[in-house]
Image (cartoon, helix red, strand yellow):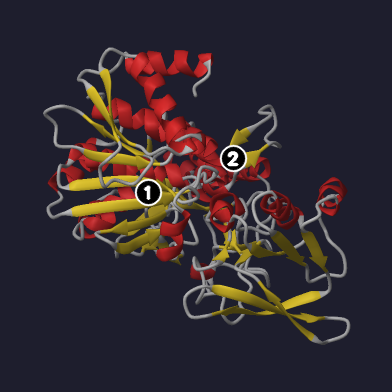
Amino acid sequence: MLDASLKTQLQAYLERLTRPVHLVASLDDGDSSAQMLQLLQDIEALSPKVSLEVRRDDAQRKPSFAVTSPGQDISLAFAGLPMGHEFTSLVLALLQVGGHPSKAAAEVIEQVKSLDGEFAFETYFSLSCQNCPDVVQGLNLMAVLNPKIRHVAIDGALFQQEVESRQVMSVPAVFLNGELFAYGRMGLEEIVARLDTGAAKREAEKIAKKPAFDVLVVGGGPAGAAAAIYAARKGIRTGVAAERFGGQVLDTMAIENFISVPHTEGPKLAAQLEQHVREYDVDVMNLQRATALLPAGDDGLVEIRLENGASLKSKAVVLSTGARWRQMNVPGEDEYRNKGVAYCPHCDGPLFKGKRVAVIGGGNSGVEAAIDLAGIVSHVTLVEFDGALRADEVLQRKLRSLANVRVVTSAQTTEVLGDGQKVTGLVYTDRVGHDSHRIELEGVFVQIGLLPNTEWLKGTVALSPRGEIIVDERGQTSVAGVFAAGDCTTVPYKQIVIAMGEGSKAALAAFDHLIRTSAPKAEAVAEAA
């Protein structure tokens, strides 16, 4: 199951085990069970601290396996083969169950240990989902730390009947004690914050006591990370308030245009960005959503108000709040979100195996999504508003070579149809003939560009008609001491490498602003002489 290179790497990791790990497999006679058995036997052979027990007559999902340790009250399991993006989750589970300490912050670990109640978590994932590992790894660690927490990670593509009965049409999908808990990416801190109802208040009180910053960066994507690093390198007091560190990069699959790095993946790059920022003396405040900006008053400090009620003040601010997927804003879209309407083909595509789907958007993202989905689903209809596709020609040639793809241009999507529980179809209007058409399908993947996260700035900072923050060549906004960078601005070409450059530039401009505003006035210099 594991090749020689992977076995060598895993064996090195398993040397860190400080207590025995016992794997309990629940198998049947299927091919997936045979593959799981081979995987677990490979793992058992790599360390004397790992043992394997096989059961075929129990009531557990098949194939599945629990990761336990004798004498420890740990309930952690995988239903399905944790390969692909989830192989790291398996390795971490083996290490943490085996006594190797987590790198999570000490205060978060204590929060997990102090949670009281009975928490039975089930997470549905797909092997191609780059958002799922954060959720799986966070809940696995919680199950290791607190005996009142149980977790099983389930491959939705393998347990298709279960997915359909629970109407799971988007991953990661987390159930708590049998009820839907959350959809989408969540890190350990966010999961704990949702369970620990007093956490937000305590965090707000802690933030309110922080002294003013020299430079405060709002947003933790590539632009924000670059701005924080460049500001911190000047030796000034720097802070970052981010709704989720990494931003939209966390939702990006393959990255092949980041200069000097031929290939990487979004979550990996996001982790590297955060690690780099934390190497400097930067106060990183994650899971903090900004709600208002108040220009500098008599004290010369710009104020940023947060959703939790706290406020932060700074001599200069860099706004790097990024963008999010643009919605169609048609009837049925919100109602059937995560019930057939999806925005990540890599994450949710496997859940639509053998079904009919539509992709909305004919740019690079839309065409790439259609190509990827064509290998999974029975049929793809690509719906484009313009009269022709806008994707690169190489992508269009690939799309046209696929037999199960239909392209509809000059089409305006007008409604998502459903039966109250899931998507059943899509309605579009022909922009040439003006007649209406209905497509019978089970899924709709929306890929129509980005919308800047700037609603909270309306009336304070000058915005373009598209909602982008208007900046000059130095990243200066219409408000003194407030700069902006990245996908939330009017700078064209929304690319990671451009966002990083703009973030660096904005931080340098903010530092220059500090020097100029803090310099003594000429009259004071003359008097001192």
Task: Describe the element under mark 2 as helix, strand or loop.
Answer: helix
Q: Position of residue 458 (x, y in %)?
A: 54, 72
Q: Residue at x 39, y 35 (%)?
A: 89
- Front residue (pair 171, 257): 171
In terms of image quadrants, where is residue 453? bottom right
In terms of image quadrants, where is residue 188? top left
Q: Which residue is mark 1?
A: 286
Q: Are marks 1 and 2 in contact (CB under 8 Å)?
A: no
- Front residue (pair 83, 512): 83
Q: Position of residue 522 (x, y in %)?
A: 52, 46
In terms of image quadrants, where is residue 503? top right
Judge the density around disc 1: few (<14), some (14-19), many (≥20) Cα neighbours within 10 Å: some
The three-letter amino acid code for the residue at tag 2 is Ser
Mark 1 / mark 2, whichever is N-terminal: 1
Judge the density around disc 2: few (<14), some (14-19), many (≥20) Cα neighbours within 10 Å: many
Q: Position of residue 165 (x, y in %)?
A: 41, 65
In-image side of 110 versus 457 (left or right): left
In-image side of 344 versus 30 (left or right): right
In 3D space, how far apart are the residues under numbered discs 1 and 2 (Cα atoms)?
A: 20 Å
Check residue 192 in the rendering and tell me which mark sits there, or answer none: none
Q: Residue at x 65, y 49 (%)?
A: 474
Is residue 422 at all visible to an observer of this figure? yes
Image position of 343 with respect to 96: above or below: below
Nearest to viewer (mark 1 / mark 2)? 1
Q: Residue at x 27, y 54 (%)?
A: 193
Task: Describe the element under mark 1 as helix, strand or loop.
Answer: strand
Is residue 204 at all visible to an observer of this figure? no
Q: Position of residue 300 (x, y in %)?
A: 42, 57
Q: Which residue is mark 2?
A: 504
- Front residue (pair 369, 270): 369
